[in-house]
Image (cartoon, grey):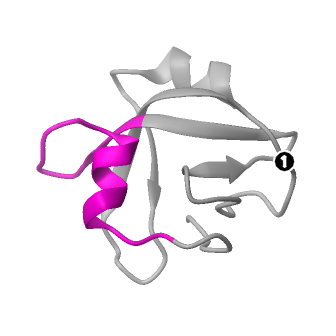
Amino acid sequence: MHNHIRGLSPAPGAWFEIAGEGVRVKALRTTKGEGVGVPGTVLDDELTVACGEGAVRILELQRAGRQAMKANEFLRGTSIAAGTRFG
């Protein structure tokens, strides 16, 4: 998945929605993460997300209509607990 996101950045982009918010978020930069789980599930408080095989850690992202930001900046203003599902 990490290489898939790299290949789509910046356009057309790889995106997801946070459950319950209905806001599209574009994943701009990632790295390979540690852990396994149901694909689309947040695994920790550093925005590591389970994929079909392995996991990715989101490093930089962009909410629809907003500027790009680092994941740690995003997490300061948005609470995403482990176990949250992305769509």
Classify the position of the C terminus by image quarter.
Answer: bottom right
Q: Is residue 32 left or right of residue 81?
A: right
Q: Is residue 79 magenta?
A: yes
Q: Is residue 85 magenta?
A: no
Q: Is residue 30 left or right of residue 72?
A: right
User: Residue 57's x, y, as percent?
Assistant: 60, 38
Q: Callout 1: helix, strand or loop?
A: loop
User: Residue 67's x, y, as percent?
Assistant: 13, 39
User: Residue 37's x, y, as percent?
Assistant: 85, 60
Classify the position of the N terminus by image quarter.
Answer: top right
Q: Foreground residue, 80 or 66?
A: 80
Could you tell me which residue is drawn at 37 percent across and 46 percent down?
A: 72
- Count of labels in the image: 1
In the rendered view, would you say 16 is above or below 86?
A: above
**Circle 1 Cα neighbour tier, 10 Å, few/some/many (<14 / 14–19 / ≥20):** some
The amino acid type of the residue labelled 1 equals Gly
Q: Is residue 59 left or right of residue 74?
A: right
Q: Foreground residue, 60 or 3?
A: 60
**Disc 1 target residue:** 35
Q: Is residue 62 left or right of residue 27?
A: left
Could you tell me which residue is drawn at 34 percent across and 22 percent down?
A: 11
Residue farthest bottom in this picture: 20
Could you tell me which residue is drawn at 36 percent across and 57 percent down?
A: 75
In the rendered view, would you say 73 is above or below 6?
A: below
Which span is picked out in magenta?
Answer: 60-80
User: Residue 55's x, y, as percent?
Assistant: 76, 41
In the rendered view, would you say 85 is above or below 57?
A: below
Task: Please tell me in which quadrant of the rendered image residue 18 appears.
Answer: bottom left
